[in-house]
Image (cartoon, rainbow, N blue to C red):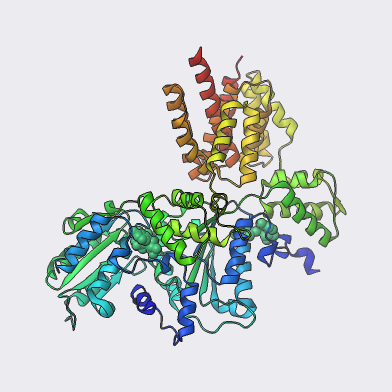
Amino acid sequence: MTEAAMDVDGGDAPQRQKASAVDANDAKKNQMWVEKYRPSKLSDVAAHKDIIDTIGRLTSQDRLPYLLLYGPPGTGKTSTILAVAKELYGPQFSQMTLELNASDDRGIDVVRNEISAFASTMRFGSNAGFKLIILDECDSMTKDAQFALRRIIEKYTKHTRFCLIGNYVSKVIPALQSRCTRFRFSPLGPNAVKDRVQFVVRQENLQITDDAIDAVTRLGAGDMRRTLNILQSSFLSKEGDGPIDANSVYATTGQPRPEDIEAIAGVLLNSNFKEAVAKVAAIKQERGLALADIVRLLVEYVFRLHMPQLARANLVSDMADVEYRLAYVTHERLQLMALVGAFANAREAIVAAAK
Amino acid sequence: MTSTSQPWVEKYRPRNINDVAHQEEVVRTLEKALETANMPHMLFYGPPGTGKTTCALAICRQLYGPELIKSRVLELNASDERGISVVRNKIKGFASTAVGQGAPGYPSPPYKILILDEADSMTNDAQSALRRTMETYSKVTRFFILCNYISRIIEPIASRCAKFRFKPLGHEVMGDRLKFIATAEGLTLGEGCYEACSTHSGGDMRKAITLLQSAARLFGTATITGKEITAVAGAVDEDQVAQVVALCKTNQVDGANRIIESILKDGFPGLQIITQFAERVVDDEGVSDAVKGKICARIAEADKALVDGADESLQLMAIVSTACVAMKA
Ligand SMILES: Nc1ncnc2c1ncn2[C@@H]1O[C@H](COP(=O)(O)OP(=O)(O)OP(=O)(O)O)[C@@H](O)[C@H]1O
Ligand SMILES: Nc1ncnc2c1ncn2[C@@H]1O[C@H](COP(=O)(O)OP(=O)(O)O)[C@@H](O)[C@H]1O
Ligand SMILES: [Mg+2]
Ligand SMILES: [Mg+2]
């Protein structure tokens, strides 16, 4: 059963050597969690209940429209369409679907030849009346190829369904968008993420504290794949025999803990310039933190602070400048000095307002 | 005498993940991976000389042994062509082929490893083309993606990996490693040597080792002190920097600029001068915090401008001018 599930994912996967029962077990054992826990049925897809229900209903009623699934990474787009295909075709999956993604050359010729060839050949022996063409990562197709696709989509409406998937809907030409029913996969809500994390925790028999689950969920930021990767690396890097705790999750990801941000903010708001540079640099060094991560979290903190609005406006604007420059590979220490400067100004404004 | 010509950074590159200093989380993860033969795709990021390439190469050696590594590991770095067509052909081809027998005595898990070193130099298109390949062939191939700048890796790729930040090495850790190398090379590390290596390298172990080797080679003495290190580190004479700051305080823009010009003429990089100037201003008790803030804001902009390819001399003049105006009593 697991074998079948795997083959769906790797439609054109390599000929593996004869898999004995032991090998199959091994394969599962070596599988990384994001793939091991890829939903294999529509009902396993976490969150997006409306979308899944709608697609499920249309699938079972044999009324599947052309689909455009889009949204940020790790929200279940590819999983959803693979589950649909499995439900539609079962073991005939690989004859009935064509999956092309950004790792395939999808220039205009391929669109014209390969896709047309697949769409126009006879279907054989399946209940479903149509074939499925999945164009994953269609946001990286050239404009020309997309224009060519527009015609082909219309030509084969009878026997084929198209499903376009991408991260950035703006890179799909409007003419294609308008031929599809659009579903946006937004980042998963914290409860859905937690449920899924808890499911994996049970399957893998992990010892983990509630705080750690909260931390994993928070750092995953609604990207289920990222969340599972954080969970697996926290498990792998765990020290000793105790459960995975929040501290080790933060340490593994190199992300500041809420208390680190608190401490840094305390320094920036209370120490003089020279001291602040030295102390923040020390915390950074000791906890192994990157300034860009600190700045992003500090902004959230600043919004919770009680301070004159104008001072906050200036401070946030300065912090945004620091973050922007850091993205361009600038010098951490010089940018730290600028950050300290931004807070020095804010401190002065706060004092002035208090008078 | 091959050992004298061989760069120490290569000679003392840890062969075993346990010898990688200061990156405990990654090391523990990789050790566990050795045990369980399971791991996700890995993304290592962080400043230069912190052990990223070392870790990736060491784990491969430990997983497969010296023979099998040849067929199971493919390493591509910035010097290899890695455009979109390479991703679609060479990389996908390697990723999709089945694995054969393991090597006796090594864990040899049933997958290959593809190392993309210096991946921040890959175009967004080439990175995009990796997305589905990383998923489809995950059973037979693990990816190690290594880079300095995480902001240059597209989000969908980052999402597919367990991310590890490599931290700049602290004073003690660096000192221990340097002592180990010095002992092996028959050198004595004298007064201030660790501190100087640590300060001038900013936590970059490669740079620290290179400084030590250059000093040893240049001075040929059996004892290396902080003074020798500073001499090869290419730092500007602190007296000169102090002079620039003093001139700024008395608003003598022209005088300050003349010194800056002469330092630049001596071949010091702009960023080096800026950094030393900034440290001095920050440490100066006679300058108010508000003024420090103004100067540092301009310095941070100059830092970005230099990354964008701006003229060093102009940016330095702008900093000096800002400082003069800000420090006007
Ligand atoms: N809604 C979800 N429910 C359960 N698991 C999910 C969900 N979304 C993502 N995952 C997990 O993340 C992995 C990747 O999901 P998937 O391939 O569907 O993402 P995607 O939306 O196609 O992302 P990308 O845009 O990066 O291709 C899955 O294998 C699964 O483990
Ligand atoms: N964490 C570390 N522990 C021990 N040696 C290190 C460490 N990081 C770097 N080095 C030294 O610096 C050299 C360069 O390290 P490398 O792994 O190539 O750095 P990068 O992170 O830039 O890939 C290595 O040969 C090794 O001698
Ligand atoms: Mg996808
Ligand atoms: Mg490297």
Q: Outermost residue, right direction?
A: B222
Percent coordinates x, y for residue B274 in the rendering: 62, 35
Percent coordinates x, y for residue A95 in the rendering: 25, 80
Looking at the image, residue B314 sits to the left or right of residue A3; the answer is right
Examine the image and state in which quarter residue A90 appears: bottom left
- Residue shown at 50% from the left, 80% from the top: B99
Percent coordinates x, y for residue A261 in the rendering: 54, 38
- Residue shown at 51% from the left, 11% from the top: A355
* Residue situated in front as seen by the camera: B261 or A265: A265
Examine the image and state in which quarter residue A135 appears: bottom left
* Residue situated in front as seen by the camera: B154 or A235: A235
Quadrant containing the N terminus of chain B is: bottom right
In the rendered view, tell whether residue B62 sits above or below residue A302.
below
Looking at the image, residue B306 sits to the left or right of residue B259; the answer is left
Percent coordinates x, y for residue A284 in the rendering: 61, 42
Residue B179 showing in the rendered view: yes
Residue B43 showing in the rendered view: no
* Residue situated in front as seen by the camera: A235 or B241: A235
Quadrant containing the C terminus of chain B is: top right
The picture quadrant for ligand 1 comes to bottom left
Looking at the image, residue B126 sits to the left or right of residue B80; the answer is left
* Residue situated in front as seen by the camera: A198 or B126: A198
